[in-house]
Image (cartoon, coloured by chain):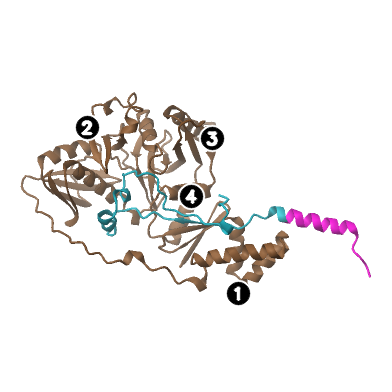
Chain colours: A cyan, B brown
Amino acid sequence: MNTKPTTDSIDTQRRNITKLALWTPPVMMTLMLSKRASADSSSSVDTLSGPPADTWGSTPPASSTSTTGSLGGATSTY
Amino acid sequence: MLLHTTLGTSHVLAHSGGDRLHLLNASAAELWQLHQVSDDKVAAHSLIQKLIVDYGLSKAAASSQVEELLLHWRQSGLLADSLERLPDTLAQACDWVIAPPFPATARSMTLTVRLAGLCCGVVVEDAQLTERLKVLLSSVLTSPEPLAHQLVLTGTAIQWQLSVNEQFESTGQGLENALTSVLHTLINLACQAEERLLVIHGAGLRLANGRGLLLIAPGGSGKTTLATALNAQGYALLSDDVVPVNLAGELLGLGTPICLKSGSWSVLAALRPDIASTQSVERFDQTVRYLPPLGDGLACPIPLGLLLFPRYQPGSVPHCQALSPEEALQHIIEAEAVIRNLTQAKLDALASWVSSVPAYALCYPDLDSALALVRQQVDKLSQPETLL
């Protein structure tokens, strides 16, 4: 029974290491779109019932409406 | 219906008409594509095998990454077996009372304004309100022409009511609230988020080469101060706070007055000496001053040239960092851009638009540093054209 030469094993290991180095864990980031008021019929809802921060031009303090998600609780790679 | 497009090395997924975008990095995108052509029952196995065979991951690592990714996709409603969507929160009943508008009287005066190519009439009953609105809207006043919308402001500065196209819009007390409401309503009408590719929360200016510069940042980042300074140095201003982008990806100029908070008045005093003589207005519990933009108005849409994401950080070393299209899109959405009626065509156009120009994050401790950083990027932009 033939056994593989040692050099082949080393080559395989090298290839595997190279392949692994190419791999970046998969990440999906979810970005929530803004619910700011706009000039459609629903804007009346936002404008009348929402706080001033929901209106254009109010430049409210930063309060991001987006959320990010990533695998395993890791920070996104972006 | 699930929409998809590519952006840089990433993949973007979204539900048609949905309220969120999912950015998959290159690895997640590769697995997503394999999942799409796999039988649901063996999809997980196929993905795990790919990671083991193609990338040399251990079985445990491959299984763990795939299972987490599938869970994430399922929780986000991206998989066929998880399409039970969240209840539509927009379908909530509205129970406020819509008051009929007061009829405009013979004393009313009509101001005609043009924003983002849209002509609107503003009928004002009260003489004091008329005079203040004339000053406030001086940069967008135009000669009478066919109107796309008509606003009617009835009552007095003490108690007023605003209607749009004969529909009740808002009511309130006080002259300053009335001014703010009229301005806000006009901007909303001009933005027409449903009909735009997107509406940027940021300032827009026109560069010397005729292309548009967008300064995009959340509120309080100093973009209005920077935009006002650039406007004073010769860049035409599209808007200091919100820029509609049409379906062709072109920027539209609002021409509305610049709204400066008290913190920027002294910083801009040398560039805009007229700040000192401008009347203050209380707006949403903040004292602001409205300044007309300098230079000519921007009647025509202009193509995008440069995306900058400014951040004022006291004590920082001024620096500039190039951003990938994925990072640029993330910043745009986090700065509360409005994207409505998402379709496949819009998603493709959005990805193409974000990828079409350079994007940089700027960080600076003062206005002079910010202006230098902007000039540096603008100069860089014009170099290839100069060489040609």
Whole-angstrom CA distance, mark 3 to mark 4, is 28 Å
Q: Is residue B235 visible?
A: no
Q: Callout 3, which amino acid?
A: Pro
Q: Secondary structure at mark 3?
A: helix
Dot in front, 3 or 4? 4
Whole-angstrom CA distance, mark 4 to mark 2, is 38 Å
- The earlier-in-sequence mark between 4 and 2 is 2
The numbered mark at residue B330 is: 4
Magenta span contains residue A6: yes
The residue labelled by disc 3 is B384
The numbered mark at residue B31 is: none
Specify the segment rendered in magenta. Answer: A1-19
Residue B316, placed above or below residue B342? above
The numbered mark at residue B39 is: 1
The residue labelled by disc 2 is B279
Whole-angstrom CA distance, mark 1 to mark 2, is 68 Å
Q: Are marks 1 and 2 on the same chain?
A: yes
Q: Quadrant of residue B279?
A: top left
Q: Nearer the viewer, residue A46 or B193?
A: A46
